[in-house]
Image (cartoon, helix red, strand yellow):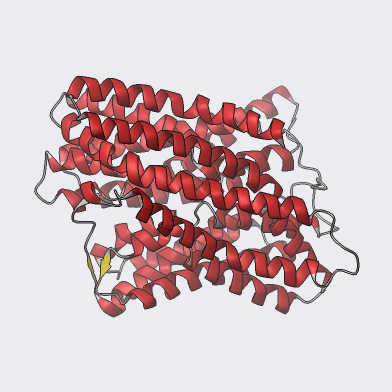
Amino acid sequence: MYSSIVANLKKVLSGISPIIILVLILSFVFKIDTRTVIRFVSSSIFVIIGLTFFTTGADISLNKIGEKISRSLIKKKNLTLILIACLFLGTFITMLEPEFLTVSTEASGIPLPVLLFSVSLGIGIFLMLAVYRIFKRIEFRVILIIGYLIVFLTLMVANMDTIPFAFDMSSVTTGAISAPFILALGVGFSSGIKKRKKDDTTEFGILSICSIGPILMILILGLLFHPNIVYDSDPILKRLNFWNTLWTNFYQVLMAMTPLVIMYFLFNHFKSKRKDKSIRGIITGLLMVLFGITLFLTGGDVGFFKIGFMLGTHLGNINHLLIMIIGGIFGYFISKIEPSLKVLITYVNEVTNGGIKDRLLEICLCAGVSLSVIMSLFRVLNGYSVMAFLIPTYFIAVLLAFFTPNNFLAIAFDSAGVVAGNMTSSFLLPMLIGVASTISPDYLKEAFGVLSLVSIIPVIIIEIVGLIYTQEEKMNGNINLDDTIIEYR
């Protein structure tokens, strides 16, 4: 375990160091007050420690719990029971996801309990659909295209004010706790299928199918309640008290993890005829996850949010091209330290037996986030509507799904659920709010939509890489990508 902690620490430091250096340089240039800079540096230490422990703990707890629950359910040989369990897990894990709870307060006019339950139920229903696809071996692109076709049809009659909020909500519902678990469920259920086609890639796609649920639910709620989307009216003062923020995050993470622990003991430990020797390691891993993600979230809320906003207010007054370059650099390196992204890359590398290189995948995803930040800044600086970028990019992503190889398609759309995570909403979003505050009096509304673009641009990049990769391999007459069945762990 010690070696894993050290290895993860090195990866975290390599990812966050450029961010810290660039923020300190800009803070010196723009003369940001010393107290804010010290708060940022202190928070960076919490982020480093928290992300290191979370990544290590997730490998030995969340991932194994997800796989053990899925395999225990498979042994029941009852598809109805499996689907009901997935409905329960998807609904309650999402309802307690920390980032989801924070963003949900922005929809004035929809009763908060109704919003929380409806969106969470959307995840639960589509998790059932994703698992049903695995057992019935339905091709991923079929579910994906039908799902987004329904979304596009709903957009024609939807409340326009709720559309950016719906797509942003889709990005935050699969967060640091739920995303690793849902990915693990997919691997566990897929490994239980004995007869599979050579090009069967059912391990992936489960996360992206779940992400369709929140979009549809919020669009429907927008028609029923006609809400007024009111974004955080005072972003500078959001969660600056360390101890209050620490306790809030600890409580929310603990509540989010509770259903997983209960399901694990019900389906695996208590029902087992022999004592599970891995229980001690899983408990240790869960404690590391609880400790790590609490520190990670607290560091982002307390230190990154304010300095991101303040840097944005200064950046808005300089050359627009330079703003977009700086924003692109931040986008690239911020995405490298998203917790769920690391989990996805690890799964892709192991499940495909190295067929899709983790380094290539990371570069593509980070480049996609960088491009999305540049596009968001371009939109804000020039006063374009978010809809002018959001709808075409989703349409392009779905259109490319007709042609992208199965190996890349499911992975591409799963990435949408992990790249727009806690660090994006804690740093990149307030930075764009700060930039927008120098351009428009309605800056809070103008800045939003970045989470949606951050989610979908990496998808398009990976789809394009998949097309290029396959064409090059066909020209060389040598397909190296391993599509055979992998007996995971």
Q: Is residue 187 left or right of residue 436?
A: right
**Image location of residue 110, percent across then percent down:** 29, 75
Question: What's the residue at 19%, 44% (across, down)?
Answer: 384
Above or below residue 273? Residue 367 is above
**Image location of residue 330, percent across then percent down:** 36, 30
The residue sitting at the front extreme is: 243
Question: What's the residue at 62%, 56% (across, down)?
Answer: 181
| 212 or 112: nearer the viewer | 112
| 343 or 200: nearer the viewer | 343
Q: Is residue 356 left or right of residue 279?
A: left
Q: Which image quarter: residue 117?
A: bottom left
Above or below residue 55? Residue 10 is above
Above or below residue 73? Residue 18 is above
| 288 or 383: nearer the viewer | 288
Above or below residue 246? Residue 213 is below
Look at the image and tell me in which quarter the N terminus lies.
top right
| 400 or 435: nearer the viewer | 435
Question: What's the residue at 33%, 37% (across, down)?
Answer: 373
**Image location of residue 71, percent across then percent down:** 78, 62
**Image location of residue 56, percent across then percent down:** 64, 41
Question: What's the residue at 22%, 24% (across, down)?
Answer: 321
